[in-house]
């Protein structure tokens, strides 16, 4: 079993996104979701910690920034697993942003609607 510091995972993910934005190479945002060595998706407390860290990293960007919107979606979906009531406003805001700034992204909107609906079902 491998162990890593959350701060190290965050730094590696931030650098991967920077590399993608500046040189259009590398994995970009995918580094927030999976282990850099084995490719396994993060889960549990690590996933929640990285969801918060990703959101804090891109929070200061414009509402129209795609990475910011994706970070909000990741935070909402990670919260849904452990604290669904806290995830509701996050997923609702993510859906509103997609509808406002990317109305032609039908797939993205459908995914956001599905996440939001599933979260509402989880909360009863």
Image (spheres, rainbow, N blue to C red):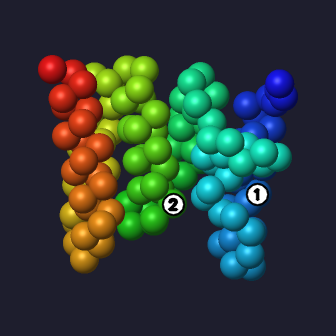
The image quadrant where one finds the C terminus is top left
The image quadrant where one finds the N terminus is top right
Residue that badge 2 annotates = 67
| Distance between mark 1 and mark 2 Cα atoms | 14 Å
> Where residue 90 appears, x then y in whole percent?
32, 39
Q: In this view, does 33 lie to the left or right of 119?
A: right
> Where residue 32 appears, x then y in whole percent?
63, 48
Q: Residue at 25%, 70% (x, y): give it.
A: 106
Residue 68 visible here: yes
Q: How many marks?
A: 2
Q: Residue at 69%, 78% (x, y): give it.
A: 24
User: CB atoms at circles 1 and 2 under 8 Å apart?
Assistant: no
- Residue 87 lies in quadrant: top left
Q: Residue at 51%, 43% (x, y): give it.
A: 55
Residue 11 visible here: no
> Which residue in the rendered view is the most extreme toward the left?
124
- Residue 75 lies in quadrant: top left
> Where residue 14 appears, x then y in whole percent?
70, 53
In this picture, is 109 found above or below 55? below
Provide the secondary structure element on which disc 1 rests: helix
Q: Residue at 84%, 28% (x, y): give it.
A: 2
Provide the secondary structure element on which disc 2 rests: helix
In this picture, is 105 found above or below 48? below
First along the sequence among labels 1 and 2: 1
Mark seen at residue 15: 1
- Residue 66 lies in quadrant: bottom left
Mark seen at residue 114: none
Circle 2 packing at 10 Å, graded few (<14), some (14-19), many (20+), is many
Circle 1 packing at 10 Å, graded few (<14), some (14-19), many (20+), is some
In this picture, is 83 found above or below 40? above
> Where residue 39 appears, x then y in whole percent?
72, 48
């Amino acid at each position: 079993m491998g162990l890593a510091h959350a701060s190290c995972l965050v730094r590696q993910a931030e650098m991967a996104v920077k590399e993608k934005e500046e040189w259009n190479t590398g994995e970009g945002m995918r580094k927030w979701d999976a282990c850099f060595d084995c490719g396994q998706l993060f889960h549990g407390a690590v996933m929640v910690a990285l969801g918060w860290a990703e959101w804090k990293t891109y929070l200061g960007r414009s509402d129209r920034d795609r990475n910011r919107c994706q970070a909000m979606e990741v935070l909402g979906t990670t919260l849904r697993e452990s604290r669904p009531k806290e995830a509701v406003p996050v997923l609702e805001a993510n859906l509103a942003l997609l509808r406002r700034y990317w109305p032609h992204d039908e797939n993205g909107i459908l995914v956001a609607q599905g996440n939001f609906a599933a979260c509402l079902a989880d909360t009863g």
